[in-house]
Image (cartoon, rainbow, N blue to C red):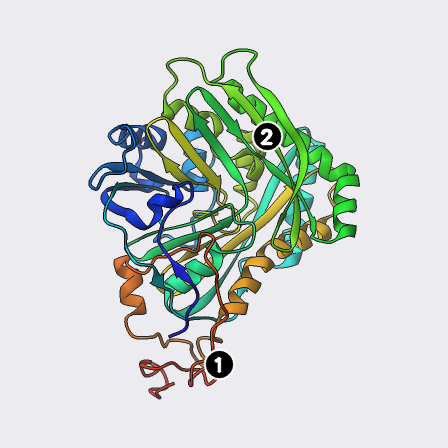
Amino acid sequence: MSILGAVAPAPPGVAAGCRDRLVEVDRLEWRVGDGGDPAALAAAFCDRFRVPHEGAEGAVCGVAVLVSAAAGAVMVGGATGAPSPVPAVPDLVLVAYAHGPARPAVEAGGFSVGPWRASWSGADHAKAVVAVQEAIGRGEVYVANVVGHRSAPWSGDPAGIAAAVAGIEGAAWGGVLSGAGWLVASGSPEAFLTVAGERAATYPIKGTAPATAAGRAALLGSVKERAEHVMIVDLCRNDLARVAVPGSVEVERLFALARWDRLWQAESTVVCRIAPGTGLAAVLRAVCPPGSVTGTPKLAMLGLVSGLEPVGRGPAMGAFGFVQEDRVRLGVTIRTVAVDADRVHVWAGGGVTWRSVPDAEVAEAEAKAGAVIARLASLSSGTPSRSRRCGLWRVRGARRAIRRGTGAAGGWGSRVRRRTPAPWAGRGGAAGARPCRRCRRRR
């Protein structure tokens, strides 16, 4: 079994001293088809556990929160888009944790990822960009995010995939959450919402370039990227103003560059003072889904892209983090993968403006997804099967583990080492692999 790093399963936003002590005490999972108000459900669940944070065993630590793009759309009354390609993952997940005894680090096992398949072609993506530009020309939207999806077969230990993604360089909001039949791992660099006392802040990222000196200069000098960024900052200002003390919304930082893996990205900070008596449900309705991965006007954008994107965004382009007594820490689920029993899924896209060049938008999305895909490839033991007839084998126990939701792990700052190939690596099979169901040969 390969060693991909000593990891502990935890969502983003959890204090370092708590990550290896989390014990689940309650859980709520919700899907769009269930009906109801996800913001109210989230607030009611979190309120049950918003007590003073203490380090003693048995004391409540906080609540992990995962909000899908579709759940965020429901919160704001917008279109939810096409069905998710990974229906095993709920649209809203809330997991309450208490402190337990410290656990030893878990060694994540090896994994393999097969060929990636896109849900649309580059040409179809480019057509969607043109459709957005036509809507801009009609005055319906000013900027809209268009997102694509890819998936691939996998095998091995899902904890290895989680560690690989959550441990990506610059993944300040890296983390993992799992359930019966699914796992979500985020390598996100983007903070979405922080609340501490009466202060709230959001941190939109808009603008991407290769992490080179030339890329940095091009991003800083790009009229298109800066215009797109400023429009999203204005959207975030408007979102916070819904729950802010009048006159308290400010832009603390504008278009500052930060590096994530192989990319430069531009981010800003928008802050406010929350009006007295404002609850978590109202805050979530004001800011969800994140402005940086939707567009403006938000409702018009949701309606537009729901007819353009062939599959839903699943847990991507949503929010993921941790809620405690008087603190909320949520990241945006960009650079995020979802794993079910058969496939690993990734989403990527970008904001489209009047100045966008369709082929450039396609290339930008491919670069974002490519960073995650390259990370998995660099740590993968190979492909699930060399046979073109099938890829049905799985290491014994891996599918059972993810179906039970016991295979999750994440690498928050842990060192991840390239595995030493096992004796079977490169032969299309694995130690303990099942016979292929179609050709009946042991791979």
Label drawn at residue 388: 1
Residue 226 in percent (x, y) is at 72, 35
Q: Secondary structure at mark 1?
A: loop
- How far apart in space, not on screen, are marks 1 and 2 (Cα)? 49 Å
State the residue in front, 8 or 382: 8
Residue type (three-letter) at the residue carrying disc 1: Arg
Looking at the image, which residue is at 53% across and 24% down?
239
Q: Does residue 67 appear to the left or right of 103 in the view shown?
A: right
- The quarter of the rendered structure image containing the N terminus is bottom left
Answer yes or no: is residue 141 visible.
no
Against 25, residue 435 (above or below) is below
- Which residue position holds label 2? 269
Against 264, residue 422 (above or below) is below
The image quadrant of residue 103 is: bottom left
Against 158, residue 124 (above or below) is above
Looking at the image, which residue is at 45% across and 79% down?
385
Residue type (three-letter) at the residue carrying disc 2: Thr
- The quarter of the rendered structure image containing the C terminus is bottom left
